[in-house]
Amino acid sequence: MENVDLVDGVHIDWLWGYCPVQAEGTVDGQKFYFRARGPRWRIGIGGDVVTNPAWGYGESYGSGPFAAGWMPEEEARDFIAKAVNLYRSGHPSVTLEEVRTYEQQAA
């Protein structure tokens, strides 16, 4: 999928792939990067969106070690929209390491 307005102020330049599923675009004028691979997905908004985003969020996904890499595009769009709502509501940023720590504690 290319050049789609997801919701007001959210534009997806591209969303495609498997292992990983990836997307890039903008949220309220800030660049974002979405990636789903292994057992989790994550998004970075603003800053260096890949390695040091101004705001980030992610969650575990699926039941297998590679489930997120096979996420359908529709679900990826839903997770991007969920993260944007959290971002806009002032939810604290969550690092990828915090997501991994939570997964280990839940196991």
Image: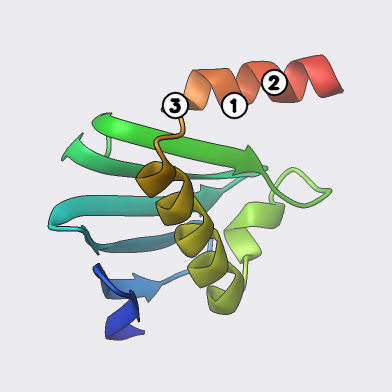
Is residue 49 visible from the viewing direction of this image? Answer: no
Q: Residues within 10 Å of mark 3 (few under 14, many from 20)?
A: few
The residue at 70%/49% (across/down) is 61
Q: CA distance from mark 3 to mark 2?
A: 15 Å
> In this orientation, which residue lies closer to the viewer: 35 or 11?
11
Which of the 4 image quarters holds residue 3?
A: bottom left
As drawn, 3 above or below 46: below
39 relative to 37 in the view: left or right: right
Q: Mark 3 or 2 closer to N-term?
A: 3
Q: Position of residue 57 (x, y in %)?
A: 47, 37
Point out which mark residue 102 bears: 2
As drawn, 63 above or below 5: above
Give the number of the mark in front: 3 or 2: 3
26 relative to 85 in the view: left or right: left
Query: Quarter holding the C terminus?
Result: top right
What amino acid is labelled 1 in the image?
Answer: Val
Q: Mark 2 and 1 residues: CB-CB less than 8 Å, in contact?
A: yes
Q: Which residue in the protein does label 1 denote?
A: 99
Q: Position of residue 31 (x, y in %)?
A: 18, 52
Q: Residues within 10 Å of mark 2 (few under 14, many from 20)?
A: few
Which of the 4 image quarters holds residue 70?
A: bottom right
Residue lying at the far front in this picture: please name it. Answer: 89
Mark 1, secondary structure of its residue: helix
Q: Which residue in the protein does label 3 denote?
A: 92
Q: Position of residue 89 (x, y in %)?
A: 42, 43
Give the number of the mark in front: 1 or 3: 3
Q: Residues within 10 Å of mark 1 (few under 14, many from 20)?
A: some
Q: CA distance from mark 1 to mark 3?
A: 13 Å
